[in-house]
Image (spheres, rainbow, N blue to C red):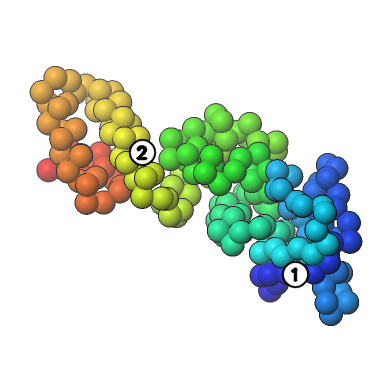
Amino acid sequence: MISYISGKILKINTGKQTYIDILTKSGIGYRVYVPSNMDIDSSKEDINLYTSFQVREDNQTLYGFKEEIDRDLFEEIISVSGIGPKTGLAILSTYKRDELEQIILEGDSRKLSKVSGLGSKGAQKIILELRGKIEFNQDDKESIENSRIKELKDALRALGFSGDALKLYIKKAEKILDKEILEIEDLLKRVLSD
C-alpha cells in the first residue's frame, strides 16, 4: 500500500478530473488524483501528499491529500457501502473537511446530495454511517448535543408528548448527553425507558 508520496511535479491537470503527475526520486512516476478544491502551488517544483491506494478489478488508483486527516476522512467516506473513490473525491472537492463535518452533524442530506454523482439515498447513508465514526472537535460536541435535543423534541412531539412531560424528557436527555453522545434512536430509547 502506498500511503505517502513525495516528488517532483511533472504535470497538473485541472480539467474534468484533477490530478498531479509526480516523479519520485527513485525515477518512478505516479498519477495522483486530488480534490479539485485543493490548493496546489504550481510555482513549487516538489510536492508531498498523503495517499490512499485503491485497487479495483479493472484499475489501481492513487488519491492524494495535503493533510493526513483529509486522507483518513476520504477513507472513512469510501468505507460506506455503495460509495466509491470517485464519489468520495467529489465530496471532498465540493466541501472542505469542516463544512462536511457540519453537514454530517446537522444531518443535512439535502446539502450533501448536491455533490455530483451522489443522490439523496447515498447522502443519507453517508450521514448515518459516519456520524458515529468521525471524531469531531470538542467545539462540535455542543453542536451535536443541540442537534440531538432538537431531533429528540421533534420525535417526542410526533409521539404525542407536550408540556411538562416533554420538558421532563428533554432534561433527562441533556443529562445523558453530558456524559455521552448517542444516536437519536438510542437517546429516545434511553429517555423513554427511564
Of residues 159 and 153, the one nearer the viewer is: 153
Q: What secondary structure is found at the residue carrying circle 2?
A: helix
Left or right of residue 58, residue 85 in this image: left
Per the rendering, the mark at residue 6 is: 1
Q: Label 1 crowding class (10 Å Cα cut-off): few <14, some 14-19, many 20+?
A: some
Q: What secondary structure is found at the residue carrying circle 1?
A: strand
Q: Amino acid at mark 2?
A: Ser
Residue 25 on image: x %, y %: 83, 77
Residue identifier under label 2: 143
- Please indicate, yes or no, whether residue 176 appears anywhere in the rendered image: yes
Left or right of residue 176, residue 29 in this image: right
Dividing the image into 4 quarters, which one contains the C terminus?
top left
Residue 59 on image: x %, y %: 81, 62
Q: Is residue 189 above or below residue 153?
A: below
Of residues 57 and 124, the one nearer the viewer is: 124
Q: Label 2 crowding class (10 Å Cα cut-off): few <14, some 14-19, many 20+?
A: some
Q: Are marks 2 and 1 in contact (CB under 8 Å)?
A: no
Left or right of residue 91, residue 5 in this image: right
- Please indicate, yes or no, whether residue 90 appears anywhere in the rendered image: no
Image point (35%, 41%), residue name: 144
Per the rendering, the mark at residue 111 is: none
Dividing the image into 4 quarters, which one contains the N terminus?
bottom right
Which label lies toward us, 2 or 1? 1
Q: Amino acid at mark 1?
A: Ser
Residue 54 on image: x %, y %: 71, 63
